[in-house]
Image (cartoon, coloured by chain):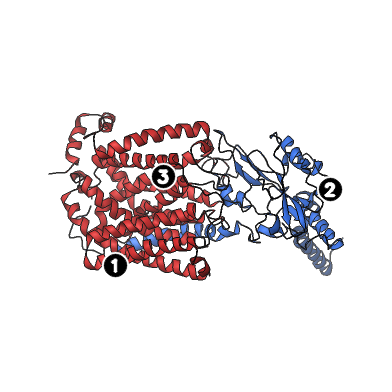
Chain colours: A blue, B red
């Protein structure tokens, strides 16, 4: 078999293109990507009836005391070191609205950027988890979290951080979070992309029932917990002033300056030291 | 001759160095001094509170809450304490990098002060950690949270303490009469100084950068993306004011330890430092002004927090700055000391306004430190002063080095 010049060039060309293109495309096949896509939870407040089955399921799944306090209109209940999620009832421009609060599972969480031991950790599946063996209890995650989610056991000699982790242990076993399992149809678990599509569909199909916003789509750089509501979100206890860019981005400028300063300042200082060394006539001994 | 090195060197001749250290550990001087009478009961009380804190948890002694997780143990002990320790990097910069030999006599005491401040205030951080047994995680092991500002601050603290220990170590070597070690350690000084200044630049600003993510929690008059730079610039005059203040006290309390030469140099040094303070404060005030204009916060000035902001900026930055300028021109040492005290109050106010007072200023229930938190803070400060006094009384810090150490050069 002989290879003439034209064929040779063609083979080289095909090989080259398939190497270049094939590699860059093949390395990130869409199937592999979807396996590790962020999961999230869509909470539709128009469907929530305030039965608090999610709260009870949450407490049971995480061995926490069952919340016994009564749910009253406009009496704010908070998540705490013994309760990872709460339902509240707000009086709004469209009557009483239930709203759930738990960790937002940010795409770029402030708490994990704050954590100096990686105890707060954004898993590839989406949930933000806390790991006891790494945490030193500095509470910088609490200072940084714009949603005030991590709760600390102030009255324990071996305190832990309590926060919703979207039932990470259940998710990796292929189960859905306990709250979503217990809920009628207000809570939907799925990939974040599916949930946003679903939320858009609901808004488009019933534009009168919803305001045209998915809370969590953009806030704080996007979150895994997504909300639909019939009223603006500042009426149901959300801080309307939170930024849409991610919170870790706020420290980026400082963090980027660190290697520059660490590398550039010492030679500069050394140069000044050398330059000023013999500046003064040493008429006096200063040892 | 009041050189303290002579008797030490003589004592040292007969004994092994361990015996010498043990003999030095014994307290010297009078027990019933006003400082001891005040500090000993508070220290004992504070140690008791610390036991309770580890036994029953942080909530049993502090007023911290889920909304305000950091109180004065961070906002005052660490953030403010470290600003005051900034004198060490400024003075070593002046003496070793710019070769301003005039200030050489205050290097040791300033570095000692800085080192003890870091050791105690970051040591006090352990009290604030909920799970202190994991404190080694960011240092060893595979748990590096490299995207964390606190991670950088922790490492820079740690390395800086090492740098300061090296800077101070010739004094320890002189005390022990260790000539070989003295020679080696003295040779490392410039390297340690360069490392120390670099690390200080980053962790002084890093303490401010810690609060960058708490954007929605800090009052807008104190929050800006410039917190790190403001913290760095204010640490210069915070540290130097501390040097002026501490120097004035040390030279009275430890008058018998101060060599004649250093005593003479002291007034000139304070005079010179006042000029640097004035310049740094002018830069700081101007920067604060720019940040304020940039933030478009005019409307907030006419609120209670706005008045409080003006008190800090005018009463404790602008006025002491002008006082520094004036007292420098007129060589009035009393006014320089007054300006230093006002400046220090201003720095305390500023750090607390960012970390405690302005943090969650809009919350329904404000954080007010508990008495026990304050006692523990005082305990930390008093123990530090005890150690400081112990070192000053034994090592050649305020006085002259022994003759052999000088001949080495």
Q: Is residue B12 above or below residue A226?
A: above
Q: Tag 3, which chain? A: B
What whole-number distance in Å separates the C-alpha atoms at marks 1 and 3?
A: 32 Å
Dot 3 corresponds to which residue?
Answer: B121
Residue bearing mark 1:
B325
Q: Dot 1, crowdedness within 10 Å: few (<14), some or many (≥20)?
A: many
Camera-nearest residue between B19 and A54: A54
- Locate the N terminus of chain A and report the quarter of the image it occupies: bottom right
- Between residue B102 and residue A5, name the one nearer to us: B102
**Distance in Å between CA atoms under marks 2 and 1:** 71 Å
Q: Position of residue B309 (x, y in %)?
A: 45, 62
Could you classify mark 2 by the number of other residues whose Cα lies within 10 Å: few (under 14), some (14-19), or many (20 or more)?
Answer: few
Circle 1 — which element? Answer: helix
Residue position marked by numbered label 2 in the rendering? A185
Is the residue at mark 2 from the same chain as the one at mark 1?
no
- Same chain under badges 3 and 2? The reply is no
Residue at 19% x, 41% y is B5
**Subunit of label 2:** A
Residue drawn 24% across and 40% down? B393
């Amino acid at each position: 078999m002989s290879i003439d010049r034209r064929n040779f060039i063609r083979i080289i060309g095909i090989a080259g293109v398939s190497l270049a293109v094939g590699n860059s495309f093949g390395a990130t096949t869409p199937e592999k990507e979807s396996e590790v896509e962020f999961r999230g939870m869509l909470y539709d407040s128009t469907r929530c009836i305030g039965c608090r089955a999610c709260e009870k399921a949450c407490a049971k799944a995480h061995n926490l005391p069952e919340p016994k306090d009564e749910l009253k209109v406009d009496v704010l209940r908070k998540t705490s070191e013994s309760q990872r999620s709460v339902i509240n009832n707000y009086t709004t421009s469209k009557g009483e609205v239930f709203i759930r609060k738990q960790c937002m599972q940010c795409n770029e969480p402030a708490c994990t950027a704050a954590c100096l031991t990686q105890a707060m950790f954004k898993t590839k599946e989406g949930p933000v988890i806390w790991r006891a063996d790494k945490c030193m209890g500095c509470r910088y995650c609490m200072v940084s979290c714009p949603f005030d989610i991590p709760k600390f056991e102030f009255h324990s000699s071996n305190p832990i951080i309590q926060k919703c982790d979207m039932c990470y242990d259940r998710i990796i076993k292929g189960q859905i979070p306990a709250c979503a399992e217990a809920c009628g149809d207000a809570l939907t678990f799925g990939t974040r992309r599916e949930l946003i599509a679903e939320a858009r569909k609901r808004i488009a199909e019933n534009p009168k029932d919803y305001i045209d916003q998915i809370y969590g789509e953009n806030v704080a750089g996007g979150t895994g917990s997504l909300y639909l509501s019939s009223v603006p979100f500042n009426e149901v206890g959300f801080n309307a002033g939170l930024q849409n860019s991610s919170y870790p981005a706020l420290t980026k400028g400082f963090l980027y300056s660190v290697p520059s300063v660490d590398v550039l300042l010492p030679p500069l200082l050394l140069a000044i030291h050398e330059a000023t060394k013999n500046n003064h006539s040493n008429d006096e001994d200063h040892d | 001759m009041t050189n303290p090195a002579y008797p030490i060197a003589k004592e040292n001749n007969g004994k092994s160095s361990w015996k010498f250290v043990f003999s030095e550990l014994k307290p010297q001087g009078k027990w019933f001094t006003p400082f001891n009478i005040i500090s000993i009961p508070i220290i004992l009380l504070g140690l008791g509170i610390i036991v309770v804190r580890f036994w029953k948890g942080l909530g049993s002694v502090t007023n911290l809450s889920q909304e305000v997780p950091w109180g004065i143990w961070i906002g005052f002990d660490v953030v403010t304490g470290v600003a005051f320790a900034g004198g060490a990097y400024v003075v070593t910069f002046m003496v070793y990098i710019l070769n301003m030999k005039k200030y050489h006599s205050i290097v040791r005491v300033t570095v000692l002060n800085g080192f003890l401040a870091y050791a105690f205030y970051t040591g006090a951080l352990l009290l604030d950690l909920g799970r202190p047994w994991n404190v080694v995680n960011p240092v060893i092991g595979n748990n590096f949270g490299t995207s964390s500002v606190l991670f950088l601050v922790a490492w820079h603290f740690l390395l800086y303490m090492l740098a300061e220990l090296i800077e101070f170590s010739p004094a320890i070597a002189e005390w022990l009469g260790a000539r070989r070690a003295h020679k080696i350690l003295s040779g490392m000084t410039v390297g340690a100084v360069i490392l120390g200044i670099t690390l200080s630049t980053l962790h002084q600003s890093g303490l401010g950068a810690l609060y960058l993510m708490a954007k929605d929690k800090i009052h807008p008059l104190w929050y800006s993306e410039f917190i790190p730079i403001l913290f760095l610039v204010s640490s210069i005059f915070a540290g130097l004011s501390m040097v002026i203040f501490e120097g004035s006290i040390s030279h009275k309390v430890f008058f018998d330890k101060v060599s004649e030469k250093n005593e003479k140099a002291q007034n000139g040094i304070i005079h010179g430092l006042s000029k640097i303070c004035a310049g740094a404060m002018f830069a700081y005030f101007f920067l604060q002004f720019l940040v304020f204009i940039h933030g478009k916060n005019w409307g907030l000035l006419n609120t209670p927090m706005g008045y409080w902001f003006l008190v800090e900026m005018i009463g404790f930055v602008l006025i002491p700055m002008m006082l520094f300028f004036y007292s420098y021109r007129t060589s009035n040492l009393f006014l320089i000391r007054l300006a230093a005290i006002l400046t220090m109050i201003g720095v305390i106010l500023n750090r607390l306004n960012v970390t405690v007072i302005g943090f969650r200023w809009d919350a329904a229930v404000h954080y007010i430190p508990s008495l026990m938190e304050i006692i523990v803070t005082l305990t930390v400060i008093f123990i530090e002063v005890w150690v400081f006094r112990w070192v000053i009384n034994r090592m050649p810090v305020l006085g002259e080095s022994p003759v052999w150490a000088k001949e080495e050069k």
